Amino acid sequence: MKVSELMTRDVEIANPNDTIEAAARLMAKIDAGVLPVGEENHLVGMITDRDITIKGVASGKDPKSTKVRDVMTGEIKYCFEDEDVDRVADNMADLQLRRLPVVNRDKRLVGIVSLGDIATGHKPSKAGEALSGISQRH
């Protein structure tokens, strides 16, 4: 099975110049804990609710003025839409990630894949293996 067959296609994107308050509101609206960050049609990072909490609020930064770019993770891990799900799940375990942005071969964002997508759309056992790998201390 290919990633494109089970990924979530409707993905909201934060702008690096948005405030972390705006990013948090968007996460609340769509009930998500992570947002890809894009600028001029390019994926430039990822921001999580943990980034906002730990790197932002807990560090004393003002959510109304702190920019997404100030707390986001700039190192982007991703997979391609035509990759095999088992291979991607193994990669997620190795990287200790619960979700990955999905890009096409032109490296344009086309979706996001999560362990939940793999568990419900493919093999629950494969998602369990990946979660076990993610949960290991490195």
Image: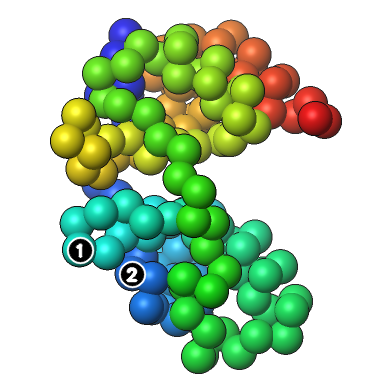
Q: Quadrant of residue 104?
A: top left
Residue 76 percent coordinates (x, y): 45, 45
Q: Describe the colour scheme in one phrase.
A: rainbow
Badge 2 marks a residue whose secondary structure is: loop
- The correct choice, above or below, for 11 with respect to 88 in the image is below
Camera-nearest residue between 20 and 104: 104
Residue 32 or residue 82, whichever sits in front = 82
Q: Which mark is residue 101?
A: none
Q: Is residue 99 visible?
A: yes
User: What label sits on residue 40 in the rendered view?
Assistant: 1
Q: Amino acid at mark 1?
A: Glu
Left or right: residue 94 versus residue 25 is right
Q: Nearer the viewer, mark 1 or mark 2?
A: 1
Q: Is residue 30 left or right of residue 111?
A: right
The image quarter containing residue 127 is top right
Type of the residue with mark 2: Asn
Q: Is residue 107 above or below residue 74?
A: above
Q: Position of residue 35 (x, y in %)?
A: 43, 56
- Determine whether the residue tagged by mark 1 lies in a helix, strand or loop: loop
Where residue 83 sits, quadrant-wise, is top left
Give the residue at x 75% y 29%: 135
Q: How far apart in space, not on screen, are marks 1 and 2 (Cα)?
A: 9 Å
What residue does disc 2 label? Answer: 15
Q: Quadrant of the N terminus?
A: top left
Residue 8 in view here: no
Residue at 74% across / 79% down in the picture? 59
Q: Residues within 10 Å of mark 2 (few under 14, many from 20)?
A: many
